[in-house]
Image (cartoon, rainbow, N blue to C red):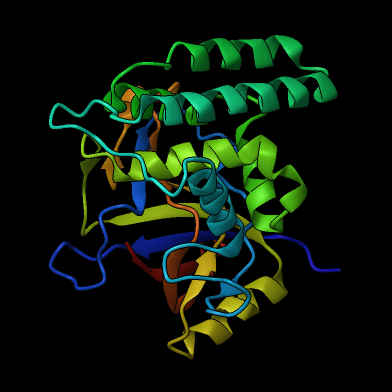
Amino acid sequence: MHHPTNTTMRMNMPSLSSDQVEQEEIVSIQSTEGRRPSRFNIIEPLKAKTFDNGESKNHVPIVEECLRLGKERLGGHRYQMSSDHTITKRLDIKSDLQLLTIGLKKVGDELGKRSESEILIESLFKLIDLSSDEVCQGCLRLYSMETFLCSPLNQFLRKGDRSKIKIYGPFVRLLCFCFDDPSIVEVHGIPVYRGMNLSLPMIDAYKEAAKSSISYRWTGFSSTKKKAIDISDYSQFPQEEEVLLKTGIEFTVENVNYDDTKKKHYINLNVYV
């Protein structure tokens, strides 16, 4: 049996001068208090990027399906913003917010967390008819809250569980919309960090990946430390320096080093945002 090994990942994000930078990939949430292991220490499988099975340049298949279903419901129209950043297709956002409340009520009842779901639902209803800035801030705040929402959302994405698209698809669409919103402050060209307890075979997989130029992806929304797009003002935990990487973030593995003093592996990644 392989015991989990304490591992720190350092991710180098290129500056805006890089051709591979796209504005929509990263978000940040802030803290100097103890980090929440359930958010920062999630083990993410190393998944090679491929264009097979419906995977596109920008999104993994399950996210593509969430976005496609949303566009079909809207007759193919995308969300648009007016010059004052108000949402011009207000009913589209309203529909996703309402669909999400239905899904959260169902999950809350199943998990025996009705009071928690009621808090989330009440917060969602407050976002209806607000400006795009306020909708994005509210959605990012909900994501940062210590509730039953964040973990199962990312499990849904990592497993590609299409049976739960109706529950989590609306929130995936809303979060992807947030990454496109011009109100989000971007920061590029800095390292961010993430801790994982990886098994030795997992670490060996990263070592092998460092020998090639293959791109890999993490399929869930990934929490790291230290800013990319700063949403610290919107977080339920404003002291955390949390950077939220968009689902399907692409990276290459630069190297894997072991610190014998700290008994810890350090994995350096180049993240293309």
Residue extending farthest to the bottom is 211
Asked which quadrant contains residue 151, the reply is: top right
Asked whether the viewer can see residue 258, the reply is: no
> Which residue shows up at 49% across the image and 60% down it?
248
Left or right for 155, reference 243: right
Q: Position of residue 185 (x, y in %)?
A: 21, 39
Judging depth in this view, the residue of 202 and 91 nearest the camera is: 91
Asked whether the viewer can see residue 150, the reply is: yes
> Which residue shows up at 61% across the image and 57% down it?
62
Q: Position of residue 183 (x, y in %)?
A: 22, 34
Judging depth in this view, the residue of 196 and 25 nearest the camera is: 25
Q: How many marks?
A: 0
> Which residue shows up at 55% across the image and 10% down it?
122
Residue extending farthest to the right is 1
Judging depth in this view, the residue of 268 and 231 nearest the camera is: 231
Q: Position of residue 261 (x, y in %)?
A: 51, 64
Q: Quadrant of the C terminus?
A: bottom left
Q: Quadrant of the N terminus?
A: bottom right
> Which residue shows up at 67% across the image and 16% down it?
117
Q: Position of residue 219 (x, y in %)?
A: 57, 59
- Relative to 161, residue 168 above or below: above
- Relative to 83, residue 124 above or below: above
Residue extending farthest to the front is 75
